[in-house]
Image (cartoon, rainbow, N blue to C red):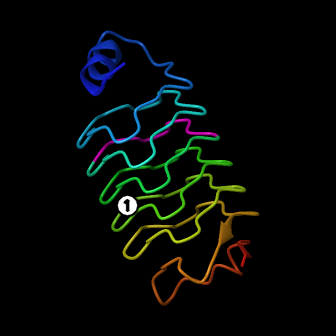
Amino acid sequence: MNSEDLKQKYRRGKKDFDGINLSEANLDGIELTRASLKGANLKQASLVASYLAKVDLTGANLAGAYLNQANLVGANLSGASLKETYLMGAILLEAILVKADLSGAILVGANLFRADFKGACYDENTQFDNDFDPIKAGMLKIG
C-alpha cells in the first residue's frame, strides 16, 4: 500500500492499518485520528505537521522519521522505536511512550506535558529542552 491508498482508505472509514509498511513514505500533513498502526514500519517516513491524535503506534518502527510539528496528543507509542527521530515542535501532550526507544531522538521544542515515559530509553545523543529532566520523567539512560 502506498501513501495515497492509505489516505483514501482512511477517508472511507478504515482505521486499522496494523503492520503497514510505509518506510520512507511522504505523509506530510496526513490526518489519521484514532487510527491503529500497531507494528507499522514508518522508518524514515516524513510525517511533518501530521495530525496523529490518539493514534495507536504500539511497537511501530519510526526510526529516523520526521515528525516535526506533528500533533501526537494522546498517541500510544509504547515500545515504539523512535531512534534518531525528529520530533522538533511536536505535540506529545499525554502521549504514552512507555518503553519506547528515543536514542538519538530530537525533542527540542516538543510539548511533553503529561507524557508517560516510564521505562523509555534515551542516550547521550537524545536532545531535550534544557528544562526537561528525563530521569524525573522515568526514562532510562542507555549506552
Quarter of the image that includes the N terminus: top left
Residue drawn at x 72%, y 56% as measured from the top left? 99
Task: Report the residue at 59% width, 61% height from top.
Answer: 115
Q: Is residue 62 left or right of residue 116?
A: left
Point 47% across, 58% down: residue:
92
Q: Is residue 71 above or below residue 134?
A: above
Q: Element type at marker 1?
A: loop
Percent position of residue 96, x then y: 62, 52
Count residues near mark 1 (Cα–Cα under 10 Å), then give few for <14, some for 14-19, many for 20+: many
Q: Which quadrant of the structure image shows residue 42?
A: top left
Vertical placement of residue 73 versus 30, above or below: below
For the C terminus, give its image quadrant. bottom right
Q: Residue 39 in the image: x percent, y percent? A: 60, 33
Residue at the farthest bottom position: 130
Q: Quadrant of residue 27?
A: top left
Which is more toward the observer, 119 or 125?
125
Foreground residue, 94 or 31?
A: 31
| Residue found 76% across the figure and 63% down from its top | 119
Which secondary structure dominates the residues rendered in magenta? loop
The residue type indicated by label 1 comes to Ala
Residue 52 is inside the magenta segment: yes
Task: Count the marks.
Answer: 1
Query: In x, y percent, where is residue 61?
Result: 55, 44
Whole-percent x and y of residue 62? 49, 48
Task: Give the residue pinned by disc 1.
Answer: 90
Q: Is residue 85 left or right of residue 38?
A: left
Residue range highlighted in magenta: 50-58
* Magenta region includes residue 115: no
Q: Is residue 39 above or below residue 128?
A: above
Residue 7 vertical position relative to residue 81 in the rendered view, above or below: above
Residue extending farthest top? 12
